[in-house]
Image (cartoon, rainbow, N blue to C red):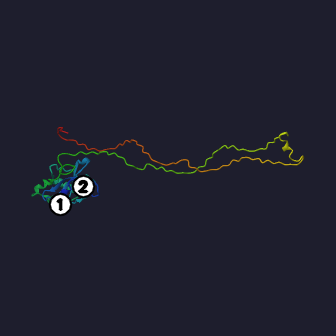
Amino acid sequence: MLTEDQARETIGRNAVSDDGEKLGKVGQLFLDDETGEPAFVTVNTGLFGTNETFIPIGSATLNGDDVTVPFSKQKVKDAPNIDAADGHMSRDEEQRLYEYYGMGYTQGDYQHGDDSSSTGDAFQESASAGRDTSGPNTDNAMTRAEERVNVGTTTEEAGRVRLRKYVTTEQETHTVPVRTERAVLEREPVTDANVDSATSGPDLSDEEHEVVLNKERVTVDKTVEPVERVRVGTETVIQEETVTEDVRKEHIEVDGDVENGRG
């Protein structure tokens, strides 16, 4: 069981169910009028913490910044609504809570003198408990918060480029002039200019004269030579992108008669 000092330390902390679900912030501490021992705390639940739910504190434990209570979130959510705006809880309200949470209760346990006090106040709010859902012992101002969108950039891999060299075979056609020799029979009359050559041999004889004919043949020779250098580089391209994000903002409304002030 928590001591009074330990129970006061729960104010403003997060209340957590026995299965680890967050219930809300502890807002008020109620002590037993007779014994002064911690009895209940209120937890601010609902949208923006607008509802207060009573939870028995006797079996709670402190775990770091959290207060763990031996009840489920649904059990706490469905707890009876208790009106303790004046900082006190009646005997009937006390009994309803104890019966709801399945805890033993006898009216004589918390009497204040005589039996007529059984319909009076059973518990009173600890004087140090704050009323603001944002924490204990706050001033009369409420803090409004809102989310801000912080837009930046981060570098991530968008793709990869790889150089790969491979060999293909293509056909090329070249036109090459080719020279071929052929025999041509030439006749010339015997003249004074060639008579000596014409009569240098025997007058009559059998002879043969052979002429070699030549021709050009196309030859092909291939060589390998470098033609260019290829490398992969990078360049930065700047583009604009529009980012749309939902942000949450708190709004404060005023209930009751109030005049517009400064600000």
The kind of residue tagged 1 is Thr
Residue 235 image position (x, y, % from top left) = 44, 45
Tell which residue pokes out farthest to the top in this image.
260
Q: CA distance from mark 1 to mark 2?
A: 17 Å
The kind of residue tagged 2 is Ala
* Crowding near the residue tagged with mark 1, few <14, some 14–19, many ≥20 C-alpha atoms within 10 Å: few
Q: Which mark is residue 75?
A: none
Q: Which mark is residue 3?
A: 1
Residue 206 image position (x, y, % from top left) = 88, 49
The quadrant in which the N terminus is found is bottom left
Instruction: Describe residue 193's horizontal placement relative to residue 172 as left or right.
Output: right
> Camera-side residue: 204 or 6?
204
Query: SS of the residue at dot 2?
Result: strand
> Camera-side residue: 199 or 53?
199
> Camera-side residue: 130 or 31?
130
| Residue located beneath label 2 in the image | 15
Instruction: Describe residue 135's horizontal placement relative to residue 238 as left or right.
Output: left
